[in-house]
Image: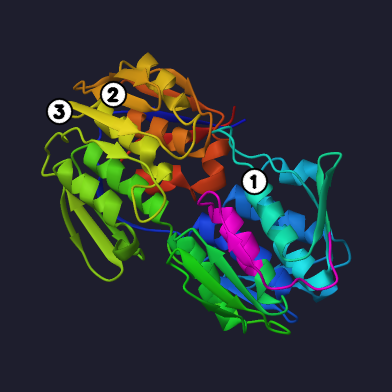
């Protein structure tokens, strides 16, 4: 198993390009099951989760090819199995996203209950309740969701909790349903909007994406298209924190500052000089140490839970004391213990991490426990004296495209070695 070895102390400077969004490309890949002709997806990030999704679709008989531009062409007309097996779904929660499209287009689906990061309870009961409200017969048998329907019927779906994958699954299911579906208390994330834009290009009739009420008028069929996935706002945020934490100066290209307001505001509070254009962000710390910030995670457009671990690393070496409150997932502070081993002064009180900043951390051998926690340990390693070795980096490869190459491009002393 590969490891990352980082020798801290380098100030990051330079330019990098931001990849396509993991959390947008995965639902869009699932949405290709709804199309009656091939779909070409552009701006694909080369991530382990994308490979897993390709394997899952391939297992179902879907034909996938990479063209010369490294776009994925997905042809679901060859599908022969409406079954998503445990050994693939258990590694990645977003596999549940094939449920809605399969059921809507083919009238049946057998999908394993999902796995993924160990960051707390993310129940799929809202997906099931929504499909049942649309007329499907759904039961959980031997760890599999078994769903059957003639044709889904439009319904009013009120989500008990804001759920991104729940909103996406039900929105996809509703595209081919008979009548109109209303999703209330819908997730407002940019990735949900990107999926809706893609579906509308395919011929769906979706309005209200990006608000808490989405309206879907069912259509008879969806067609193949070419679609470019939006940039990854979490990857962009992670590299901005990397620059801020090292007192550096970076410019991110091919990004979307308009969907990163909460993160950019928190970085400005930390003392960063930030300028933006339509598709670029520049951050300059002028060699200064960041100031500690107080943040609380919440669904979009508030501060994203996927940036919490990175800001925990920032606060660990900032001037002053900062508090980070996690309201989305109940088990998302597993990186704190590893940072404490590197000399961070972080105290956990319930769902809040209180950090008293230290000037430097010290290198140590640490272990990644989930995707964003592993990114935060890389950030901590950038500002640690000596060498930091990060084990179990397969988590990082699920969500960051060539992280060691991009950081090295900015001047970090980082390398990947076989485990």
Q: Residue at x 11, y 37 (%)?
A: 288
The image shows residue 218 at horizontal and vertical percentages of: 66, 80
Q: Are marks 3 and 2 in contact (CB under 8 Å)?
A: no
Q: CA distance from mark 1 to mark 3?
A: 37 Å
Q: Which circle's residue, 2 or 1, is located before the other in the chain?
A: 1
Q: Residues within 10 Å of mark 1 (few under 14, many from 20)?
A: some
Quadrant occupied by the C terminus: top right
Q: Nearer the viewer, residue 225 or 346?
A: 346
Give the left or right position of residue 19, taking residue 275 as reference: right
SS at circle 2: strand
Q: Nearer the viewer, residue 294 or 385?
A: 294
Which element is circle 1 on?
helix
Q: Is residue 297 magenta?
A: no
Q: According to the image, label 2 marks what residue? A: 354
Q: What is the CA distance from the residue labelled 2 to the residue labelled 1?
A: 30 Å
Query: Magenta span has 160?
Result: yes
Percent coordinates x, y for residue 7 in the rendering: 34, 27
| Number of numbered callouts drawn | 3
Q: Which residue is mark 1?
A: 93
* Badge 3 or badge 2: first in the primary sequence: 3
Question: Sequence order check: which comes first, mark 1 or mark 3?
Answer: 1
The residue sitting at 21% across, 36% down in the picture is 293
- Residue 66 seen anywhere in this rendered image of the structure: no
Foreground pick, 360 / 314: 314
Task: Say which residue label 3 marks.
Answer: 319
Q: CA distance from mark 3 to mark 2?
A: 13 Å
Tag nearer the camera, 1 or 3: 1
The residues colored magenta run 148-172
- Mark 2: few, some, or many residues within 10 Å (few <14, many ≥20)? some
For residue 199, what is the image quadrant? bottom right
Q: Residue furthest right?
A: 80
């Amino acid at each position: 198993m590969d490891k990352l070895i980082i020798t801290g102390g380098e100030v990051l400077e330079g330019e990098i390009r931001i990849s396509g969004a993991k959390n947008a490309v995965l639902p869009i890949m699932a949405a290709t099951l709804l199309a009656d002709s091939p779909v070409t997806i552009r701006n694909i990030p080369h991530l382990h989760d994308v490979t897993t999704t390709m394997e899952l679709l391939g297992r179902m008989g879907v034909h996938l090819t990479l063209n010369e531009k490294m776009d994925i062409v997905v042809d679901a007309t060859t599908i022969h199995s409406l079954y998503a097996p445990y050994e693939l779904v258990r590694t990645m929660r977003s596999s549940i996203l094939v449920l809605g499209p399969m059921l809507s287009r083919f009238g049946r689906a057998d999908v394993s209950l999902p796995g993924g990061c160990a960051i707390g309870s993310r129940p799929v009961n809202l997906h099931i309740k929504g499909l049942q409200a649309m007329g499907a017969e759904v039961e959980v048998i031997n760890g599999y969701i078994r769903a059957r329907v003639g044709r889904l019927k439009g319904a009013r779906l009120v989500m008990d909790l804001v759920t991104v994958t729940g909103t996406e699954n039900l929105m996809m299911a509703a595209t081919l349903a008979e009548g109109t579906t209303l999703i209330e208390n819908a997730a407002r994330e940019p990735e949900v909007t990107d999926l809706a834009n893609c579906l509308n290009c395919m011929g769906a009739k979706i309005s209200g994406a990006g608000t808490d009420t989405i309206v879907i008028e069912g259509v008879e069929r969806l067609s193949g298209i070419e679609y470019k996935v939006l940039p990854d706002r979490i990857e962009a945020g992670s590299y901005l924190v990397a620059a801020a934490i090292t007192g550096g100066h970076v410019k991110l290209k091919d990004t979307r500052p308009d969907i990163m307001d909460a993160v950019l505001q928190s970085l400005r509070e930390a003392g960063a000089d930030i300028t933006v254009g339509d598709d670029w962000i520049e951050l300059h710390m002028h060699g200064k140490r960041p100031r500690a910030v107080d943040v609380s995670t919440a669904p979009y457009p508030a501060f994203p839970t996927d940036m919490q671990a990175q800001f925990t690393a920032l606060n660990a070496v900032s001037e002053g004391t900062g508090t980070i409150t996690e309201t989305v997932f109940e088990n998302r502070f597993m990186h704190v213990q590893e940072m404490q081993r590197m000399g961070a002064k972080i105290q956990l009180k319930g769902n809040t991490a209180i950090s008293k900043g230290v000037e430097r951390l010290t290198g140590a051998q640490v272990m990644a426990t989930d995707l964003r926690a592993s990114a935060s340990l890389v950030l901590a390693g950038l500002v640690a004296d000596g060498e930091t070795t990060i084990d179990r980096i397969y988590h990082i490869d699920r969500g960051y495209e060539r992280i060691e190459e991009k950081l090295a491009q900015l001047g970090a002393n980082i390398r990947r070695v076989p485990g």
